Image (cartoon, rainbow, N blue to C red):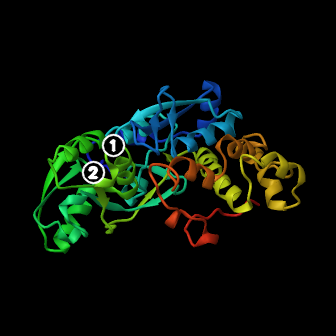
Amino acid sequence: MKNTVFFGTLATGALLAGIAAAGTLDDVKARGVLNCGVHTGLTGFGAPDANGDYQGFDVDICKAVAAAIFGDQSKVKYVPTTGETRFTALASGEVDLLVRTSTWTYSRDTDLKFDWAGVNYYDGQGFMVRKDLGVSSAKELDGATICIQTGTTTELNLADYFKSNNIKYTPVTVADDADAQRQFLAGACDAYTTDASGLAASRATLPKPDDYVILPEIISKEPLGPLVRHGDNNWGDIVRWTFYALLAAEEKGITKANIEEVASSTTDPEVRRILGIEGDEGKMMGLDNNWAKNAIAANGNYGEIFEANIGSATPIKLARGLNALWTQGGLQYSPPFR
């Protein structure tokens, strides 16, 4: 989301200096807390609640990783990052892990030296307008003013889409989601564009959400997920397989409520490996063998985390769609635990 164009902002030397050396797990254990980069505030994905405690779909990935390492999901220090600061925070080592609706792209993977540990939300860029504008398609936005965050590839997607459809627009640049919402509500722009999940999250916080509509067009692929620095494969494995454990748990019917019952009664060999009943999967990464069990027990499986934070029963009202399990027609799929 808000795919920040990072070229030229962080020198190659600084990037290379920030590449992880083997031993991130040791550093995290010695510190006693996981430093997790999160959003400054996007409802449903990552935002402080009334008590100042971070909650959300992305935040629960941070909690699961902390639970896998420490057996305690509370051992997380949340570092709020903007679209402009998030990659610097990760490259410099300020955070061990970034889980902030960040899109996996070629240049970020190769030039910025980051590794994505999976895709926790398959998304795409869309448009939101006021219902009374009378627009039902993005192709009807010829001549419109459009709020868009500066320094993002969302700008490039927008330019490409309007050029390919031979229509014109006037950009209204904004600094972040909060600024975009203020400008949009004030009537400074006819439409607001960002990832469709972000539009849904923003609309849910508007005074009269039903007065706004998200148009049907999705103009890009935005695979969002947790990422780490290049250079420490074991640390990347820990984050990656913690996420996969949440997916596998949903597929196997393991929930926060039944995990102890399943652990005491299951005869499924893969479930037994996931829950640490047999095998040494945890030790292979330098963790206890109950690492995955602890990660799942923290806030439930992937489906539970999705529904609790951004699902159809929440104000965000997102359907599973592409984020359904592969067995339900979606793209979410865990490699085998063996």
Amino acid type at circle 1 is Gly
Query: Looking at the picture, does residue 168 appear above or below residue 23?
Result: below
Q: Which of 188 and 95 lies nearest the eye of the viewer?
A: 188
For the question of whether residue 23 can be seen, the reply is: no
From the viewer's perspective, is 58 left or right of 31?
left
Residue 265 placed where, x, y %? Answer: 89, 53
Q: Which residue is mark 2?
A: 152
Q: Which of 70 and 279 lies nearest the eye of the viewer?
A: 70
For the question of whether residue 177 can be seen, the reply is: yes
Q: Are marks 1 and 2 in contact (CB under 8 Å)?
A: yes
Residue 180 placed where, x, y %? Answer: 25, 44
Q: Residues within 10 Å of mark 2 (few under 14, many from 20)?
A: some
From the viewer's perspective, is 112 left or right of 288?
left
Query: Looking at the picture, does residue 215 appear above or below residue 266?
Result: below
Amino acid type at circle 2 is Thr
Q: Residues within 10 Å of mark 1 (few under 14, many from 20)?
A: many
Q: Which of 155 and 49 lies nearest the eye of the viewer?
A: 49
Which residue shows up at 77% across the image and 50% down it?
A: 281
From the viewer's perspective, is 34 left or right of 47?
right
Cα–Cα span, label 1 and label 2: 8 Å
Residue 168 lies in quadrant: bottom left
